Image (cartoon, rainbow, N blue to C red):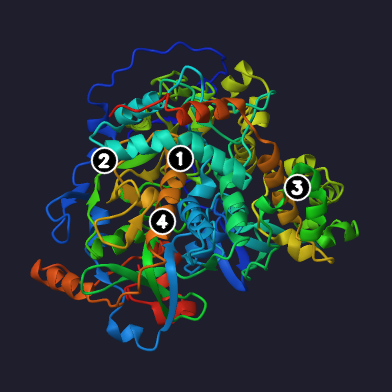
Amino acid sequence: MTNNISYQEALANYEAVAERPLPEVNYEGLLEKYHPDYFKDACVQLKIGPNKGDICHIQLAEMLQADARIDEADLAGAQVIETDILIIGGGGAGCAAALTAAETGARVLIATKLRLGDSNTVMAEGGVQVSIEKDDTPQQHYDDTLRSADRPVDKKLVAEMVMSAPDVIRWLIQQGMQFDLDEYGDLLTRKAGGTTAPRVVYFRDYTGLEMMRVLKEAVRSTEIEVLDYVPTVELLSDEDGHCTGAVLSSLEDNRYKLVKAKSVIIATGGIGRLHLNGFPTSNHFGATGDGLVLAYRLGAKLRDLDSFQYHPSGLAYPQHLSGTLITEGVRSAGAYLLNAQGERFVDELQPRDKVAAAIMRECAEGRGVDAGNGIQGIWIDTPGLELKNPGIFNARFPKLIKIGKKSGIDPRKQPLLIYPTLHYQNGGVIIDKHGQTNIPGLYCVGEVSGGIHGRNRLMGNSLLEIISFGRRAGIHAAKYSPRKPFRKISIEHLSRLRRELMLADMPMDSKGPILFPAYAKFETDSDYSGLHKNKKSK
Amino acid sequence: MNQTTETLINATINGKAISAPEYLSVIQALWHAGYPRIKSVGCLEGVCGTCRVLVRRQNSQNITTELGCQVLIEEGMQVNFLAFPTPAQQHYKLEDIRNSWEVQDNFHTIFPEAENCRHCGGCNTTCPKGINVERGVILAAKGRFREAGDLFTECVLCDLCQSACPENIAPNHVGIFSRRVTAHLHTRPSNLINRLERLRKGELKVVI
């Protein structure tokens, strides 16, 4: 690590000032040199599967090309459950799909690795994008999304998403979700980095928490069946390549269950807990990319596997909170980013990839703050914002005040040390506007799907995406599933996987999906001995 | 700030003697010491309510209920995880409440226990978010749902208050009910409604 400036010295250099001019910033070559997506050796070519030959992050490639956790013998005597629609994952996208499907009378089962609501949704802070201000339009929302994506996207998906946004908010309010309102009861908006209009609606810095507890409560009040603590280890298929259900592993009784379903909706979220490139993450404990692995094995095509979002403002210090998110809403409200010399170095409302890369540049070039134990970062000037806008933290960012209490730092009085944190998987499974993949009977919604965000997602577009496409998939699956007959269930597709692995001369000693990050020691936990597959404990 | 030698802290977690650096949460400390832990781990940011722990600090008579990801390990601390299934909850559909005049009536059907509150304060003591839970229940029972709901802004549905209640009230669900009816029946933003109207009339399109 470059010699940065010590925490104490940098703190002495800092002074709370309400207004600071933006210096000249050079964005030329910034991403190529500092963004982790461009790190040398970060990516490899996939050797097997529908994306053979495509570029993919090396850690993700290892998982996509791992052997399956089960074979025929594991399924002998397993309990079989039947349902119309199986939803894998109990976050925002899964619940939205479940609620809409169940409204039509379809039988719905949600299978979740941990508990209903354990997801990245509950942790989302910033808000939801929806063009409602009078000078704003869905077209502008669409244009902003494409411009920040910085790579071709599936334009039809983006258009569907932005046009559906107002109805998504109406639906959320009907489910009982609160938003921050002005004195006349209108929705307040704030501006996201990389956008041309204030368009993010929110509830404090608890937007995801408010959304998730409402959806969870709504799901629990319906006939939807919920199975907690049942990680999915494989999909089921028939001889025509249809997806016909899934194999669940129960953390309660250490046994496998087979779910026979007419449609399967994967809503498993992202992969932050793989800690790509050794980064801390703002993601939930369960975000290990299970859905990508399951879908890929069955032949679903993926996209943009080399691109991930590093959120600029992950807390860097104190260490036990490392990676914890500080919402972009704080920058949106006007907080500056300052280096160890107490100077601004980037337009804080550029898209996230640029801001993150600029922070890494400061630290690489010796203008970062060194907090010891390998911790480095730059300041987010929260006292400056409080000075400019007294009382804003109490009113708008109660979660940040709580984080401050846990850090022993009052963000209104002292700036917080931040460094980019692994936040979001930009790509994923290719879907159509109903969330359907190229595998009949298989849908993917939310972070596990790809095509909307290109190389860089805008704040507020993910909470929008999960509800917009969750509802679409729920409606579509409910319309076509209940009348269909059940099809045969098998894990025949694993023979193809193993044949391909052998022909490509790939190692078959690691089994996927990994289900939990290595440090949780699932594979050696005697409580789950019946489900262990990766014998080498890491 | 620049530590070269790490101070190790000794504590007992789930009956196991653990030594770990002082900057780790009790979940991280358990992992650090090589013990597995999967259940009772969630967002690790204090918003999912899964990692409930009982904590007794050195030289203290008190046992507190906290969220494991938010508790830093301390010398002599005893910690036990509370991993038991979520209790069954009330079933209600917001659509069944036909208008705002009938909320209170519906509330007492859904939560008949709520008016039996003994004011024992157990819910307040157990709440890891410091919410005035008891007041929320009392306000809801009087039909003051907006006020009650506001008190539960930070509720993470950890269910500790429910476990503490001798009358089997589910105070957290009372809180979320209060919040939901307020939005469902009273949030009507004109800027959103206006935009929905323009979309309905086909005035706004996206050119790809």
Mark number displayed over residue B131: 3
Q: Nearer the viewer, mark 3 or mark 1?
A: 1
Real-space Cα separation, disc 1 to disc 4, in angstroms: 14 Å
Q: Is residue A20 above or below residue A131?
A: above
In front: A124, or A415?
A124
Marks 1 and 4 share the same chain? yes
| Residue position for label 2 | A37
x 40%, y 24%: residue: A195
- The chain identifier of the residue carrying mark 3 reads B
Q: Chain of mark 4?
A: A
CA distance separating discs 3 and 4: 32 Å
Cα separation, mark 2 vs mark 1, equals: 25 Å
- In space, the residues marked 3 and 2 are separated at their CA atoms by 42 Å
On whether disc 3 and disc 1 are found on a single subunit, the reply is no
Check disc 4 and report the residue beneath it.
A267
Instruction: Write the residue at 21% across / 50% down.
Output: A56
Check contact, mark 3 vs mark 4: CB within 8 A.
no
Foreground residue, A441 or A110? A441
Question: Is the same chain shared between marks 3 and 2?
Answer: no
Which residue appears at 42% of the width and 47% of the height?
A281
- Where, quadrant-wise, is the C terminus of chain A in this rendering? bottom left
Q: Is residue B2 left or right of residue A412?
A: left
Counting from the top left corner in percent of width and height, residue A536 is at: 32, 73
The answer to which of A344 and B89 lies nearer the viewer is B89
Q: Amino acid at mark 1?
A: Leu
Q: Answer above or below: position of A164 versus A331.
A: below
Residue B204: image quadrant is: top left
